[in-house]
Amino acid sequence: MNRHRPSFPFLAAILAVMGSAIFQACAPEPGAPVEIREGSSPDRLWYRRPAADWNEALPVGNGRLGAMVFGHPGREKLQLNEETVWAGSPVDNNNPGALDNLPLIRQALFAGDYGRASALAEKHMLGTPPRVRSYQPLGDLLIDLDGVQAGSGYERALDLRDGLASVVCETPDGITVTREVFASAADDVLAVRIRAGRGARISGSIRLTRARDATTRTASDTELVLAGRIIDKADPLSGPGGEHMRFAAALAVRTKGGRAKADGEALRVDGARSVTILLAAATDYDPARLDFDPGADPAGKAVGTLARARRRSYGELRARHVAEHRALYDRVSLDLGGPSDAGAVPTDERLARVQAGAEDAGLAALYFQYGRYLLMGSSRRPAALPANLQGIWNRDFEAAWNSDFHTNINLQMNYWPAEVANLSETVAPLADFLGRLTVPGAVTARKTYGARGWTLHHLTDPFGRTGVADGVWGVSPMAGPWMTFPLWDHYEFTGDTAFLRDVAYPIMKGSAEFVADFLVPSPGGWLVTAPSHSPENAYIDPKTGRAESLTYAATIDVEIARALFENCRRAAGLLGVDAEFAARLKELEKRLPPLRIGRFGNVQEWIEDYGEAEPGHRHMSHMLALYPLAQISPETPELFEAARRTIARRLEHGGGQTGWSRAWIVNFYARLLEGEAAYRNLLALLRKSTLKNLFDTHPPFQIDGNFGGAAGIAEMLVQSHRGFIQVLPALPAAWADGRFRGLCARGGFELDASWRGGRIVELRVRSKAGGRLRLADPFAGGPVEVAGADPAEARPRDGMIEIATRPGQEIVYSTTTSSAKSQALPPFPKCQSGTAPRDLARTRTNLARRGAMPAENSLTTMSAS
Ligand code: FUC
């Protein structure tokens, strides 16, 4: 059987025409051979073999509930996750000796006695226990199917647009058996559907297992319940032992024809034409209190959710899921050109070709969309927690770095694509979590630093651990303030003042209060953070020649403090509150040390121009000013040049070793307006740090590189941090022809662009919030046609377009050259109309309430040009 070549000539002809139209749309290479197969859809990962290991399995997720789908023909394994299944328990890890010893530590730092400062901090600041426990898997769903094998038509795939994983296998008689898996945010269940072709029957068994701390029982002939409680062994390094998190999964099976019956701990299905499996899960975690809820009934909750979902047919559940998923996913399309038949090559082979030195622009576009898919899958409501180091996908009971929330680059990076890639709602679980962390964070601020406000250090867990963790390198009190930036970004991109007032500003203000109290005068007369770190990096102590890491006023701290104060002042001004506080922040800001240029012409990483212990270190924290902050830009030419040298020097010394580090470099080069260098590093990310399922690998798998890489691709196409929007600011030659739809810019603008030979052919700008548009002339002074606004006003002047917009207004710029016009690309597939997500609806209502936009104005509907 060959599923990919239609057997009827007529159908083949139609499909060939349709297929070539799609290919034309994706990669304009006239005459390129087109093979018609399902794998040719651009937003799709697909494979000819089952997953050999976890790093080849395919993820589905609804924000809180996830599965890795392996696709073995006769034994499907879905490795399950529920985002709140964590070992550990709430612990106040603040070191009681911190505050008394803080003056001594500061004294030692200011006297240049770094070794002593470090020893004191190790003893008096490090938390007890120093470590958090791990995020854990929920279990495995195992489906054994009698007599099913790979067959010649075997294929497994992940359709990113629909959020569907699928597997196609065969019976020995060549009958096709298909499986489909999705995680529905609309109904909060995982769904699996198995069907056999030509009226064939399906038989097999279904089990739910977990290697630790749980048991499974059959609740009826069609239901399984797995329930358990995590038992932690007492460990001085990670906390008290005991019976902690309670969790449960409830599963129901529905058959068409045939029958299901309980069989020991499993369910047995015989002679069914189709089988549908639904699974819901819950724990006793109470996000509001960052604690267990003793009154919670996880099994009851899972069974309840399942019961609601069971009232719907599979078709209904699927349709609701696809509509909800597409309402977010379809806002953005990306076509970067590339070989027209690339999608007809399985994803692992495609990646292998790139890893062997080939280039594949379509794979970069797929990586970008996969980043969006993963962010939707690991951080959208109903999620209660933000995306952790592995999003929500983790198979290990003791995961690498506990699969926790690392806040010295990783959690921040997870949210870099959220706004620009038009997935604003994914910030909601992060904002919720940060709001809750301000409670234990205030205890840490007070007990450790005698400061008001709140903070946290370089990692945390769902139980709100905010004291110093891991080791002396964990003394990073500015990690809390750093975490406020995604909230400010959310405001800048959406113009949602209700969010700013009710959610972001209180968190930002508390953070600024902390920093204001934490700053102390240095011997050099500046206001500085002390103690401080440049995350995980070390310098050479000029006195002892030893590598030290504890310092005061590491450059990153100064950048964070300045950005936080500026954001707070702007927010206070916008909201008409706290004028005095804002004025005070302005005064403090003036006394912060400046950014300085060091001996290598680089941006200085520490308060002194120390020697570097590891010149190629993976962290490039002082470059925060270049990306994601906007303190270094072409408007600061010396620092801009120094930033270029800083990154070049890191790379010369072997930098960018980890996925996230490489992804950050892509963003840096995009901000340096060096498309070729950004592209080279993106290729390096794909070549050195990408697994077969396109997961980023640190190693091992860590999701930040996926998100940082997606953000980097967006940053090469659109930037808006300099007070105006730039389209194609860092376009490499390899992406000479392409187009995107739906990328976002600060000020509440959404953009579509198509380009040929690196030149814009058409640009559409949609104003969501009715703000003033400032856009660098994308036509570089060339002739341009304007529609959707008064051309006299909207035309570029002196390299800039500047015009007041109305909410909902779309302005279309197109080149007037007829040759370019005739090459205009055909439309992207039309957006599906879907249910507007709750947060988006809220944003819209807020804007409407302010009179900024009509309530009905759709932020999601984009007509194909
Ligand atoms: C930071 C990085 C490591 C790793 C860990 C989870 O500490 O320095 O490389 O990514 O987070």
Image (spheres, helix red, strand yellow):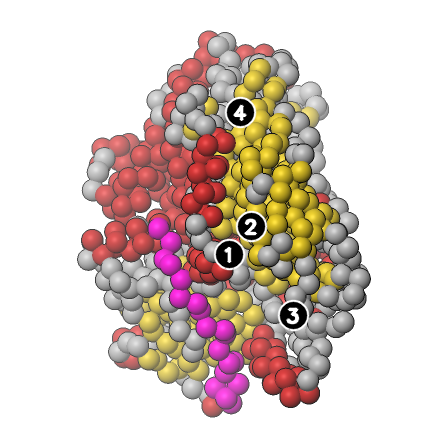
**Viewer-nearest of labels 3 and 1?**
1
Q: Could you tell me how far apart the alpha carbons at marks 2 and 1 are, in whole angstroms?
A: 9 Å
- Residue under numbered circle 2: 254
Identify which residue, 455 or 521, lies in the foreground: 455
Residue 106 drawn at (x, y percent): 50, 17
Q: Count neighbours of disc 1 (C-alpha within 10 A) and say few if under 14, some if 14 to 19, many if 20 or more.
A: some
Query: Residue at 24% across / 59% down in the picture?
Result: 855
Q: CA distance from mark 3 to mark 1?
A: 23 Å
Q: CA distance from mark 4 to mark 2?
A: 30 Å
Crowd around label 3: few <14 · some 14–19 · many ≥20 (10 Å): some
**The N terminus, quarter of image:** bottom right
Q: Secondary structure at mark 3?
A: helix
Residue found 23% across the figure and 35% down from its top: 578
Q: Position of residue 457 (x, y in %)?
A: 51, 27
Of the residues under marks 2 and 1, which one precedes in the sequence?
2
- Mark 2 and mark 1 in contact? Answer it, CB < 8 Å: yes
Q: Mark 3 or mark 2: which is in front?
A: 2
* Amino acid type assigned to the residue bearing label 1 in the image: Tyr
Residue at x 35%, y 22% (from the top left corner): 452
Q: Is residue 189 visible?
A: yes
State the residue position of label 3: 38
**Disc on the earlier residue, 4 or 3:** 3
Query: At 59% from the left edge and 15% from the top edge, which residue is drawn?
Result: 241
Please tell me which of labels 4 and 2 falls first in the chain: 4
User: According to the image, label 4 marks what residue?
Assistant: 245
Q: Which residues are magenta?
A: 819-838
